[in-house]
Image (cartoon, rainbow, N blue to C red):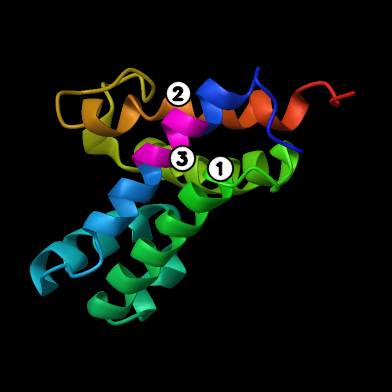
């Protein structure tokens, strides 16, 4: 089994959080989907080419996929960590590329950026899963 007792708290809490987030985005209204798309386009400009409703659907599926990978015991920790790393890396990229989210130093979160900056914990968990020791 790829899911060790040492990884369980990391995978269960993060997986449940992200799965719930994706589940709640299944039926976004067009305005919310467009807002999320505008924010995501700051990190990955190509997403601006999608229709907002499609973007919302893809975001929902991506989050549910990452959450499910983290919660599924037979998914190797490194693979789940890579999925989480890609997702959380995109979130942090958006944070750093949106000037309103940081103070003038470009690192510390502004009032608007605190909601995204706190997601740095997912980067740490992804790294722990990727770099963790091989199970016996």
**In this view of the protein, which residue sits in the foreground, 78 or 113?**
78
42 vs 81: above or below: below
Where are the magenta residues, as a range? 12-17
The reply, left or right, for residue 66 in relation to residue 129 is: left
Residue designated by label 1: 70
37 vs 80: above or below: below
First reached walking from the N terminus: tag 1 or tag 2: 1
**In this view of the protein, which residue sits in the foreground, 50 or 100?**
50
- When asked about the image quadrant of residue 133, the answer is top right
Marks 3 and 2: which is nearer the front?
3
Number of dots carrying numbers: 3
Residue designated by label 3: 15
The reply, left or right, for residue 99 in relation to residue 6 is: left
x and y percent of residue 114 in the render? Answer: 23, 25
| Residue at 74 percent of width and 43 percent of height | 76
Contact? badges 3 and 1 (CB < 8 Å): yes
Mark 3, secondary structure of its residue: helix
x and y percent of residue 1 in the render? Answer: 76, 38
**In this view of the protein, which residue sits in the foreground, 19 or 55?**
19
Magenta segment, prevailing SS (helix, strand or loop): helix
Mark 1 surroundings within 10 Å by alpha-carbon count, few (fewer than 14), some (14 through 19), many (20 or more): many
Residue designated by label 2: 121
Mark 2, secondary structure of its residue: helix
| Residue at 18 percent of width and 70 percent of height | 27
Mark 1, secondary structure of its residue: helix
């Amino acid at each position: 089994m790829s899911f060790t007792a040492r990884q369980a708290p990391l995978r269960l809490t993060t997986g449940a959080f992200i799965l719930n987030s994706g589940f709640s985005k299944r039926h976004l209204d067009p305005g919310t989907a467009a807002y999320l798309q505008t924010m995501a386009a700051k990190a990955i400009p190509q997403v601006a080419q999608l229709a907002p409703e499609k973007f919302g659907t893809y975001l929902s599926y991506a989050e549910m996929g990452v959450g499910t990978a983290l919660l599924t015991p037979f998914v190797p920790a490194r693979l789940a960590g890579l999925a989480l790393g890609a997702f959380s890396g995109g979130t942090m990229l958006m944070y750093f590329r949106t000037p309103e989210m940081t103070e003038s130093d470009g690192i510390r979160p502004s009032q608007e950026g605190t909601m995204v900056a706190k997601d740095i914990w997912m980067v740490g968990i992804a790294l722990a899963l990727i770099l963790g020791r091989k199970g016996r």
